[in-house]
Amino acid sequence: MRNAFAQQITQLAQQDPRVVVLSGDIGNRLFDDLKAKCPGRFFNCGVAEANMVGMAAGMAMTGLRPVCYTITPFLTYRCLEQIRVDVCYHHVPVVLVGTGSGLSYASLGATHHSCEEMGMLRTLPGLAVLAPADAWEVKAGLRAALAQDGPVYMRIGKKGEPAIHAAEPDLQLGRWIQLRDGADLCLFSTGTLLSVALAAADLLTAAGRTTAVYSCPSVKPLDESVLTEAASRFRVVATLEEHSLIGGFGSGVAEWWVDRPTPPAARLLRFGTRDEFLHLTCEQEEAREHFGLTASELARRLADAAG
């Protein structure tokens, strides 16, 4: 995903001279092509992420289109006040890109995990939140983010995520992408767990329960038209994210759910990380197993809910 981001931002920067990239002391070699093709438009801000976000806000106020890039927890938790006051309060078009989101850096311990930041950031007024599923969605998401006239936060993985799409999809804020249709269950997946969602759907299909699967890169705003249809069509609807069950994508869907004038009859399930720190030092797959974010466990719990 980070390679796809570097390739796409280089291409978009060549097309738009206003685009500048600010890095929190990572990705220097990753952006060699950008530095060669767009000299003077890459800024290594060092381990001073809060300053980086403040710089980006100032640049945006002068008409530039700044993109901030660094490891997710250092961009979000460390800079919440700057994102809130410098970027969102002034509603300036800064794109914040956090790499290694969720449990991508499970092997580096809890300081490098980011399972709460969407819950924090989606409460900020005017800030859109994106969570692409694969490299193609990263490219499309970055293009969509730079087309906005306000701030956007995009959380991406690290490397090695499986490609789901065969080409760049038509990704728009407030719109989700249907990958499969089904009659029994509906699974909304955001971020890098989409391949797990598809594998769970395969297991359910083999057991005689067809499952609709949507990629949901737009966490804020939600796709209310798709939600409305799913709530009336399916007996069980589920959300999946590599993020805490508190405050994230599933919480956003649940808030929409209970605010309907007539509550949907469908049952809503949410899959994500529990309200705990992961003290286990391990790889991402083992961390997902710890939280039950595997195809077999999803399929089992969905089948139980469907009865």
Image (spheres, rainbow, N blue to C red):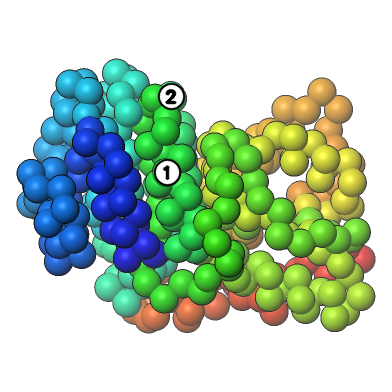
Toward the viewer: 193 or 302?
Answer: 193
Dot 2: element: loop
Residue 270 percent coordinates (x, y): 66, 54
Q: Is residue 100 visible?
A: no
* Residue type for callout 1: Arg
Pick the residue in front: 69 or 139: 139
Task: Please state if 117 lies on the left or on the right of 42 as rendered.
Answer: right
Tell me the mark number nearer the camera, choosing from 1 and 2.
Answer: 1
Classify residue 296 as left or right of residue 282. Answer: right
Quadrant for residue 172, please give it: top right
Numbered mark located on residue 125 in the image: 2
Numbered label attached to residue 143:
1
In-front residue for pair 117/212: 212
CA gap, disc 1 and disc 2: 22 Å
Q: Is residue 237 visible?
A: yes
State which quarter of the image contains the N terminus.
bottom left
Left or right: where 209 falls relative to 116:
right
Residue at 70% in and 34% down? 224
Image position, residue 130 (x, y; %): 47, 45
Give the structural element (helix, strand or loop) at label 1: helix
Crowding at mark 2 (Cα within 10 Å: few <14, some 14-19, many 20+): few
Q: Position of residue 95 (x, y in %)?
A: 32, 39
Image quarter (top left, top right, bottom left or bottom right) of the C terminus: bottom right
